[in-house]
């Protein structure tokens, strides 16, 4: 890690909208409203998380009012191109992952976990009452900075993204259906039937990749890795490529044999259709993400 020494004059703040706000306050969903009236346990944590988020958002606004920087506020999901010296996310890891796709390698990010009782916040630098110190240090350039490897994804001749921070999933669009494909890496190739393939970065190796049986990589590693989900071996076949590392400079290719395939980037909200016969290619991106305060989380 290195210290961030940047001139910060313009800040973009992107905050999540809590589940409670979306379904109870905005949509006034009848089912949610009924559960709230009944004080049902299924919505209890949603209200607590919403209130914590709103307190953190108010605190952040107060801090920025005192720091003397130009601040633009947006809600996640409606971001335009970044025109700022620093991007701040207020939410959790999901918020940071979503916003990271609009941030290039020239703009640092810092995440604030606004409801730590309901969110892991692995990528976030602070929670609760420590919001003020973390934001002030980010603007002053005293938070440690780490360049995280991201993943580039090509579909045939088209670049789909250069900004996958955590992982992607290639699978059939229907979770219960079999995913069929040819997997190729390092000169080897194998035909599979499975529930899909996870491909991830070092930053994403402690999440879905680890749960699926992958390795936890050093956070500064430039390798990618893949893990096949539930490979089918009922026909007695011996599969050699059910997991593996992808060194920098190499790539993993998946040739779809699935009529209705899809690839999902950093969660369920960014997806792209993968037609039958198309080739997905995953490699190290030339655009790392410069994240502030990783591993130095402060709790209030």
Image (cartoon, rainbow, N blue to C red):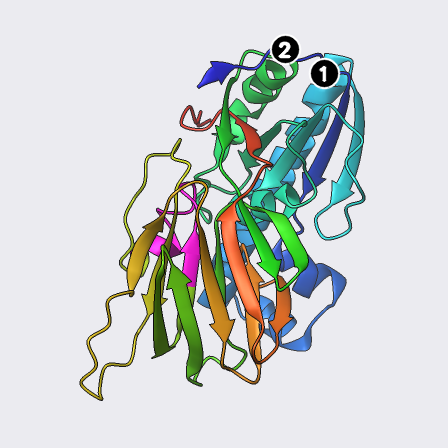
Please report the residue visible at 48 percent of the width from the left and 15 percent of the height from the top: 2
Task: Looking at this view, name the residue that lies furthest to the bottom.
Answer: 235
Please report the residue visible at 52 percent of the width from the left and 63 percent of the height from the top: 43
Picture quadrant of residue 53: top right
Span highlighted in magenta in the image? 198-210
Residue 68 place in picture, x, y as percent: 78, 13
- How packed mark 2 is, by other alpha carbons closer than 10 Å (few <14, some 14-19, many 20 or more), is some
Q: Quadrant of the N terminus?
A: top left
Q: Mark 1 points at which residue?
A: 8
Q: Judge by depth and name the residue closer to the eye, 33 or 83.
A: 83
Tag of residue 195: none
Picture quadrant of residue 227: bottom left
Q: Judge by depth and name the residue closer to the eye, 199 or 213.
A: 199
Picture quadrant of residue 239: bottom left
Left or right of 191 in this view: 89: right
Is 268 in the magenta? no
Residue 48 place in picture, x, y as percent: 52, 50
Q: Do residues under tags 2 and 1 come within 8 Å of each other at their CB atoms?
A: yes
Q: Judge by depth and name the residue closer to the eye, 64 or 230.
A: 230
Is 208 in the magenta? yes
Using the image, determine if residue 293 lies above or below residue 157. above
Please report the residue visible at 63 percent of the width from the left and 37 percent of the height from the top: 89
- How packed mark 1 is, by other alpha carbons closer than 10 Å (few <14, some 14-19, many 20 or more), is some
Q: Mark 2 points at which residue?
A: 140
Q: Judge by depth and name the residue closer to the eye, 38 or 2.
A: 2
Using the image, determine if residue 84 lies above or below residue 36. above
Instruction: Look at the numbered disc 2 and give the secondary structure of its residue.
Output: helix
Residue 114 place in picture, x, y as percent: 55, 39
Instruction: Look at the numbered disc 1 and give the secondary structure of its residue.
Output: loop
């Amino acid at each position: 890690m290195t210290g961030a020494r940047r001139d910060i004059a313009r800040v973009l703040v992107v905050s999540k909208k809590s589940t409670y706000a979306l379904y109870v306050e905005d949509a006034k969903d009848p089912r949610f409203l009924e559960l709230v009236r009944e004080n049902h346990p299924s919505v209890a944590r949603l209200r607590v998380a919403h209130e914590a988020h709103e307190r953190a958002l108010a605190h952040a606004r107060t801090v920025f009012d005192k720091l003397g920087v130009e601040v633009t506020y947006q809600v996640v999901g409606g971001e335009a191109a970044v025109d700022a010296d620093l991007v701040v996310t207020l939410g959790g890891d999901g918020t940071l992952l979503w916003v990271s796709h609009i941030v290039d390698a020239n703009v640092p990010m810092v995440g604030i976990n606004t409801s730590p009782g309901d969110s892991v916040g692995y990528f976030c630098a602070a929670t609760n009452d420590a919001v003020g110190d973390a934001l002030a240090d980010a603007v002053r350039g005293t938070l440690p900075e780490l360049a995280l490897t991201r993943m580039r994804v090509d579909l045939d001749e088209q670049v789909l993204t250069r900004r996958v921070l955590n992982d992607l999933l290639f699978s059939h669009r229907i979770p219960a259906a079999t995913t069929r494909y040819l997997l190729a890496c390092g000169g080897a190739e194998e035909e599979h039937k499975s529930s899909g393939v996870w491909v991830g970065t070092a930053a994403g190796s402690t999440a879905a990749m680890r749960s699926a049986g992958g390795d936890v990589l050093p956070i500064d590693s430039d390798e990618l890795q893949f893990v096949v989900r539930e490979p089918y071996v009922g026909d007695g076949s011996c599969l050699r490529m059910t997991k593996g590392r992808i060194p920098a400079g190499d790539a993993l290719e998946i040739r779809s044999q699935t009529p209705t395939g899809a690839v999902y980037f950093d969660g369920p909200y960014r997806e792209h259709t993968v037609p039958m016969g198309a080739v997905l290619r995953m490699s190290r991106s030339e655009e790392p993400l410069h994240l502030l305060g990783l591993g130095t989380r402060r709790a209030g």
